[in-house]
Image (spheres, helix red, strand yellow):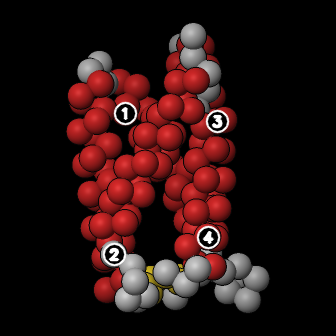
Amino acid sequence: MPKRQSSRNSYVPTVIFASLLGTYAELFFVGKGYYEFSVRPFPYIFSINILFTLIVLPLFTWVFLYLANKMVSGWERLVFMIFLSLLASIAERVAVRLGLLATSEQWSHYYSFFGYFLFLVLVWIVSRSGKS
């Protein structure tokens, strides 16, 4: 039982990294005008949706790490990362239709697919870098 608790705690540095990476990526893309969060807490203070980068993204990262660590094969993880990236791209389209997100004409939802895939690969590499 203590090993399981230790395993969960080992995700903390990677989850913090993922949250920071996501926050800076959002700040960059919003700053460049590629998209904006139509609905966000404290809109006069933050240009990004801080609930997403400080709550949703860390939870998503923790679940990703938990499930990816249970997978034996690297191919399984690769397919899992592709699947999650596809889901993220679909979720972005839904967010646009619901009015939660507005994208510029320069933005393509394919960017999100590749961006989330790269994000997951980086998160996985960081999570593995602390392991012996």
Q: CA distance from mark 2 to mark 4?
A: 16 Å
Residue at point 63%, 62% (across, down): 23
Residue 33 at x, y percent in the picture: 55, 84
- Rendered view: 74 above or below 96: above
Q: CA distance from mark 3 to mark 2?
A: 32 Å
Q: Which residue, given by chain and number where applicable, does mark 4 sit on?
A: 28
- Rendered view: 23 above or below 129: below
Whether residue 40 is visible to the viewer of this picture, yes or no, is: yes
Q: Which mark is residue 108?
A: 2
Whether residue 49 is visible to the viewer of this picture, yes or no, is: no
Q: Which residue, given by chain and number where applicable, does mark 1 sit on?
A: 67
Residue 40 at x, y percent in the picture: 59, 81
Sooner in the amino-acid sequence: mark 3 or mark 4? 3
Nearer-the-camera pick, 111 or 3? 111
Residue at point 47%, 49% (across, down): 119
Q: Which residue, given by chain and number where applicable, does mark 3 sit on?
A: 12
Residue at point 64%, 44% (across, down): 17
Residue 80 at x, y percent in the picture: 27, 40
Amino acid type, label 1: Leu
How many other residues sit within 10 Å of disc 1, few (<14), some (14-19) or many (≥20)?
few
Sooner in the amino-acid sequence: mark 3 or mark 2? 3
Sooner in the amino-acid sequence: mark 2 or mark 4? 4
Nearer-the-camera pick, 88 or 7? 88
How many other residues sit within 10 Å of disc 2, few (<14), some (14-19) or many (≥20)?
few
Is 58 left, or right, of 110 in this rendering? Answer: right
Amino acid type, label 4: Phe
Q: CA distance from mark 3 to mark 4?
A: 24 Å
